[in-house]
Amino acid sequence: MDPAETIRFIDAISRDRNVDRDLLLRDLEQAMISAARRHFNSLDTEEFACRVDPATGQITLWQMHEDGSSEVIPLESLGRIPAQTAKQVMIQRFRDNERAGILDEFGKRVGEVVTGTAHRYEGGSLVVQIDRAEGFMPRSEQIPGEQFHQGDRVRCVIRDVREDGNRVKIVLSRGHPDFIRRLFEAEVPEVAEHVIELKAMAREAGFRTKVAVASIDSKVDAVGACVGVRGSRIRNIVDELGGEKIDIVRWNESSQILIGNALKPAEVEEVSLCFELGRATIIVREDQLSLAIGRRGQNVRLAARLTGWDIDILTPEEFAKGLETLESTIKAIEGVEDAMLDRMGALGMISVFDVEEVGLNTLVEDVAMESGLAETVVTACADKARLVSEQQEREKEEEARRKAEEAEAATTDGGEAAADSILGGGGDAPVVEPAPDAEAEAAAASILDGEESSLASEHSEEA
């Protein structure tokens, strides 16, 4: 091969594959040494040496003798088999260098949003072409229901880069919360400049996301800046996610206020926190109950993940009933004072179930009960909790049975109505006689009149 052409190939590979040029030259030298050792059947790694001129591409190969002398080996003398050896070594080294380059380049871009082209699906995973590398998006990292066709533009975040055997695996994601975070940084300058901070995030990809935001500048409204003028900024993010709903929640250091904000658009009446159990009991009006829970419990589930609290939602009637049951159960025990009940309420214990879960130590240490009294209280609440659970289970069964009977009755009534419609009203419907035919009546009258005339004529002849 012409030396100048060799250099052009080296430069092209270095540029296209992003591999260091000097590294490629060293690989070529090692390939030529391997070819020489193969040709001379040598095991000595120091017997041969090679140098490729980086300017001209001239390859010089020589053999070192034991007496210290060296002899230049013409490349033409190596033959076909050593040339194949050199080719294989070069290909392998190029692949290794390319893999190392990809690992180094994309390893620094973990967490970055990239735009690629959909290539194909493999076992549910989407293969995406990103620059000179292929990344894959597992089904778990995709947005449910989203489908790409070959050549479609795919915007995603790099989640992980690692070596997998003889290849580099680049894991991409559109379903991870970090993707939402990067989209906010791209669409909202205040987020990218860290004037607005995304304090917490909870996401169910493809359905809904809740983001808690706070501003370090009192002049900047965190929620308003994220929404944008007439919703322009948030609309761009929603469009990128295929219509996924995004709730922007105002962050607050107070857990009570934050939980109330996280459950919006529902209006919260009261928030009771039990720090021992990490549980928040939320009181909402009856008309706000379904809104607070959300479709299939999605709103309350995301709010719990956003705030880090287990959330129970009750109506005022349910809340009052639980407090009444707790109070009646504990007040019946000798030695329990009103101050103890107040401290239990302040700790968020609002039902017999809470007292059973909190246990003995909290009552002794935080409520100031004696050990024997605390044990009696816990036992009484546990017994009452079991009775309440049984009662609730019976009520659920009764409600389910009532609904089943109503559904069956509705089905039966619907069947009877359909049968009546088909039969034309059933057996009780009045029978309507058909109207007499005028022409038939006239014909009958004519016939009768003719018969009467004939009889009269015969009678007169006889007379």
Image: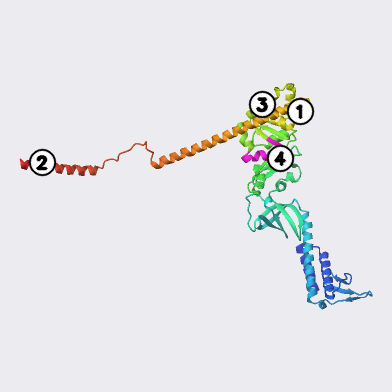
Q: Secondary structure at mark 1?
A: helix
Q: Nearer the viewer, mark 1 or mark 2?
A: 1
Q: Nearer the viewer, mark 3 or mark 4?
A: 3
Measured as percent of width and height from the top left, residue 336 is found at 74, 22
The residue indicated by pointer 4 is 306
Quarter holding the N terminus is bottom right
- Which is more N-terminal, label 4 or label 3? 4
Which residue, as the protein is rendered here, is positioned at the far right? 67
Category of crowding for the residue at label 4, using alpha-carbon neighbours closer than 10 angstroms: few (below 14), some (14–19), many (at least 20): many
Going by the numbered disc 1, the residue's amino acid type is Leu
Q: Label 1 to label 2, Cα distance in Å?
A: 123 Å
Residue at 70% from the left image edge and 24% from the top image edge: 330
129 over 435 or under it: above or below: below
In the image, is residue 309 part of the stretch drawn in magenta? yes
Which residue, as the protein is rendered here, is positioned at the far bottom? 77
29 over 219 or under it: above or below: below
Q: Label 1 to label 3, Cα distance in Å?
A: 18 Å
Residue at 76% from the left image edge and 25% from the top image edge: 373
Q: Label 4 to label 2, Cα distance in Å?
A: 111 Å
The residue indicated by pointer 3 is 325
- Which is more N-terminal, label 2 or label 4? 4
The residue indicated by pointer 2 is 456
Going by the numbered disc 2, the residue's amino acid type is Ala
